[in-house]
Each structure stands twice: as structure tokens, then as C-alpha cells.
């Protein structure tokens, strides 16, 4: 907390009020204007909340100008290089890196919840064979509350913790089943002898007639994607989870709300848009003319630039190496799609048009290429995002539940409709003129 204050004055009336300024560990100071309606009879106007701090949080910090991303204070570069996804889950949930015994206990606590109730498997068969797997995620995650009644009391810390573990554990199973359903394959049960990422790949791609052979480079590439997407501060889906949670809704419905928000193409669908763009370009020889159309404003270059990062996305630096390593090992860099991607990357990093506008390749550009190389269809890309982001949603929800003065969220509005008027009986109404 800081002794710094700012004075806000209404020039129309001359009335003033003093607002305290709060300082965080990092980042911009924020003006506490909660008393503004009482003191001056006004609200702030901030469409999309782009300059509003909606909460206090100790989980994730982003400095978009400097290209910094921290989980609980740890740089994302260090975690991606040295950590595992399950360790990052522990860090986000509990605030500190685990000791070996703590990690072992946490890993087992997650594994024991990976299995889905058999009744939930019938939900998949209620979907069309060509349904989008995100529709399955929204429905089945929301339905978890109908099966796990022993963890729905949000005022009980043990119930909250059990629900958190269940969401982290069951999301890969739910996601893998959605893929297998649309592919017409039998569901594959989780294996507790495998770690989190190996287990997910096995549940997704194994077939009953032969053992699944793991490609460790592919496994590590997927794990890095999951680490990089685990949390990203107060983005649209995370804010939705918090908004839903403020009504004291149980965490399964909050997570379902987060999944529904993530499904939007402006949020979780960006890496899918990258592949569609590469498919449209079709061949490296078409890139120059495509870029000229971008410069004319015909359309956007997908997978470049970021709303928050005004510098190079720190996650893109990490995932770029993983992407190139995977394509080399799979001997895929000479396939048209990936050859086009690498040439587009090269041109964009050298072209002054993109450099001046800081349109660097972002994490969506490389994650889309990696997921495609791993064999995931386009409609599974956002599902993979949801699997990775679940731990962030859970950690943010848990943090909010521990706030002593938590209140239901209630944004205000600037009303611009008709002024107050009296009801006109039908017999007295004149025909509206066109």
C-alpha cells in the first residue's frame, strides 16, 4: 500500500474527492475509486475494462511493454525450460514450487481423479458425430456437478480443493474422449502409470489393437505449450470464471463458463486461424502477394502481434525453438504447410512493415503449427487451450474464494436509451411512420 493519493475534481460542481493509490509488487499503480459514486455521484466509463483492475491477484504478472510473464514471480522462460506441467500446476495452485515429496503427493492426488464416472460417457453419445468438441467440453464439464456431490460446498475448503483437483485431473480425459468420439474410436481410459502429458497423448491417440509409441520430442513440445498457456492474468475467460464465481457458483459451472468464453475466435481460436491462413496461402511462392494484401488492409495477419505484448511475446521465443525442433525430427519442415509457415516467419521478422508495427510471431502462430504437426485436427486446438488453461482458472477461482470480503460482481453501464416515459394504451398509439 502507498500513501500516494490523487484528487478527482468535478469541474461542473467544484466538488473534489481524494482517491488512494494502490501499488502492486510489479506493474502500474491503480487508483482506488470505489467511493466515486458516493462522493461525486459518478461511475467510471471503461469499455472492455482495459484500464480497470478488477481484482487483486498474486498469481500471474504480465508486462506487455517489456515482454515479461511471471507465474508466482517465476519467469516463464525458466519454467518452460526446467519445469513440468504438473509442477507448474502445483505452483499456480499453492504459490510455491513443491519439494520432491510434495510433488509426488500432488501428482498422485491428481491421478486418482482422472477417471470419469461411467454415466458421463453417455453424454458424448448425445452429440452428433460431427459436433465441435468444445461443445462437448462445455456440456460435460458443466455436468460434473451432477456426479460429484461430495465437493460442491464452496464454503468448505476441503470441497473446494477436491473440486480443483478434479477439474485439473478430468479435463484431459474429457478432451481426449471428445476427440475419440468424433473420430469414431472407443474411449481410452487413463493410465496412472503415466505422467500428465504422456497420459493425455495415450488417451487421445492410442488404439486398442497395438501399443502407443511415444515420441518424446512431441511430448515435450506439447508440455511446453501447456506450460505457456497455463495462466495469463485477467483475460476474457479467466475474468468470466471470476465473474461466475462471484455469485458463489460451484467451480464446475465456473469452468464451463470459462470454456464457453475461450471458444470465441477472438480468444482461444487464434491458433486455429493461423492454420487456416497457412492453408489459404497454400505455398511459399504465394506469400509476397499475400503480404501485399495485408499491407493494403484487406485482412489481418493471423498469429502476429498481441493485444497485451507490445514487444516480442516471451512465450513465442520459447515455443519457436520447440516448434523448429519438432518439425525437424518429424521431417515435416518440407511439407507445404510448414514450409509456408517458416517462410512467412522469416519474411515477417525481416520486413520493416512488421518490425515497425511490432508484429512479431506470437504464441498462437507456433502452437498452431505444433498441434497440427502432432496430428490434432483444427477443432481440437481450442480444446487443447482449455486443457492447459484449466489450472489457471482453478487457481484464480481458489484465490477469489479465499478473499474475506468477496462480493458478487456488478459492472455498471452508461445508459443511452430512451428517457423515462409513460405507457401509451394501444387505442391511443399512432401508426409508426417508416
Image (spheres, grey):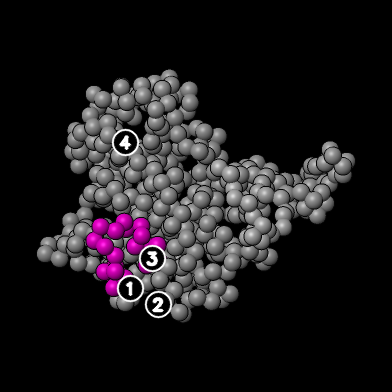
N-terminal of the two: label 3 or label 2?
A: 3
Residue 237 horizontal side relative to residue 205, left or right? right
Horizontal and vertical percent position of residue 197: 32, 57
Give residue 277's mark.
4
Residue 250 x, y percent position in the rendering: 51, 70
Residue at the (26%, 36%) spot, across then down: 279
Q: How many marks?
A: 4
Tag 3–tag 2 contact (CB < 8 Å): no
Residue with the mark numbered 3? 139
Q: Secondary structure at mark 1?
A: helix
> How far is disc 2 from disc 4 in space, using C-alphas?
41 Å
Label 1 crowding class (10 Å Cα cut-off): few <14, some 14-19, many 20+?
some
Q: Which residues are magenta?
A: 121-141
Q: CA distance from mark 3 to mark 2?
A: 13 Å
Viewer-nearest of labels 1 and 3? 3
- Residue at 42% of width from left, 68% of height from top? 142
With 306 as the anchor, is 425 left or right in this view? right
* Labels 2, 4: front one: 4
Amino acid at each position: 500500500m502507498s500513501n500516494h493519493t490523487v484528487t478527482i475534481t468535478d469541474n461542473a460542481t467544484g466538488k473534489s474527492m481524494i482517491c488512494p493509490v494502490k501499488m502492486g509488487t510489479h506493474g502500474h499503480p491503480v487508483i482506488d475509486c470505489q467511493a466515486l459514486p458516493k462522493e461525486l455521484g459518478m461511475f467510471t466509463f471503461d469499455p472492455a475494462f482495459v484500464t480497470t483492475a478488477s481484482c487483486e491477484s498474486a498469481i500471474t504478472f504480465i508486462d506487455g511493454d517489456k515482454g515479461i510473464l511471471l507465474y508466482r514471480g517465476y519467469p516463464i522462460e525458466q519454467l518452460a525450460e526446467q519445469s513440468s506441467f504438473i509442477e507448474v500446476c502445483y505452483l499456480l495452485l499453492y504459490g510455491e514450487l513443491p519439494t520432491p515429496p510434495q510433488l509426488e503427493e500432488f501428482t498422485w492426488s491428481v491421478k486418482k481423479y482422472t477417471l470419469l464416472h461411467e454415466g458421463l460417457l453417455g453424454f458424448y453419445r448425445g452429440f452428433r458425430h460431427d459436433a465441435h468438441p468444445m461443445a462437448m467440453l462445455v456440456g460435460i464439464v458443466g455436468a460434473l456437478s451432477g456426479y460429484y456431490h461430495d465437493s460442491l460446498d464452496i464454503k468448505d475448503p476441503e470441497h473446494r480443493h477436491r473440486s480443483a483437483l478434479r477439474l485439473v485431473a478430468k479435463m484431459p480425459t474429457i478432451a481426449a474422449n471428445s476427440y475419440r468420439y468424433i473420430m469414431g474410436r472407443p474411449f481410452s481410459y487413463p493410465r496412472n502409470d503415466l505422467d500428465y502429458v504422456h497420459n493425455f497423448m495415450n488417451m487421445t491417440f492410442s488404439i486398442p489393437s497395438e501399443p502407443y509409441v511415444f515420441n518424446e520430442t512431441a511430448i515435450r513440445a506439447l508440455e511446453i505449450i501447456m506450460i505457456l498457456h497455463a495462466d495469463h492474468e485477467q483475460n476474457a475467460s479467466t475474468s468470466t470464471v471470476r465473474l461466475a464465481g462471484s455469485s458463489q457458483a460451484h467451480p464446475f459451472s465456473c469452468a464451463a463458463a470459462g470454456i464457453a468464453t475461450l471458444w470465441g475466435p477472438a480468444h482461444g481460436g487464434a491458433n486455429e486461424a493461423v492454420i487456416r491462413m497457412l492453408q489459404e496461402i497454400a505455398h511459399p511462392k504465394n506469400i509476397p502477394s499475400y503480404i501485399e494484401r495485408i499491407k493494403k488492409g484487406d485482412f489481418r495477419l493471423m498469429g502476429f502481434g498481441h493485444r497485451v505484448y507490445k514487444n516480442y511475446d516471451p512465450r513465442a521465443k520459447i515455443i519457436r525453438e520447440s516448434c523448429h525442433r519438432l518439425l525437424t525430427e518429424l521431417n515435416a519442415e518440407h511439407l507445404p504447410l510448414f514450409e509456408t509457415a517458416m517462410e512467412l516467419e522469416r519474411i515477417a521478422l525481416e520486413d520493416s512493415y512488421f518490425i515497425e508495427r511490432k508484429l512479431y510471431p506470437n504464441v498462437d502462430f507456433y502452437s498452431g503449427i505444433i498441434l497440427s504437426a502432432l496430428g490434432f485436427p483444427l477443432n481440437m486446438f481450442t480444446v487443447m487451450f482449455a486443457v492447459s488453461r484449466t489450472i489457471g482458472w482453478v487457481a484464480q477461482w481458489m484465490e477469489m474464494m479465499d478473499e474475506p470480503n468477496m462480493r458478487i460482481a456488478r459492472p455498471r453501464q452508461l445508459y443511452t436509451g430512451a428517457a423515462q416515459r409513460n405507457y401509451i394504451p394501444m387505442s391511443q398509439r399512432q401508426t409508426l411512420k417508416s
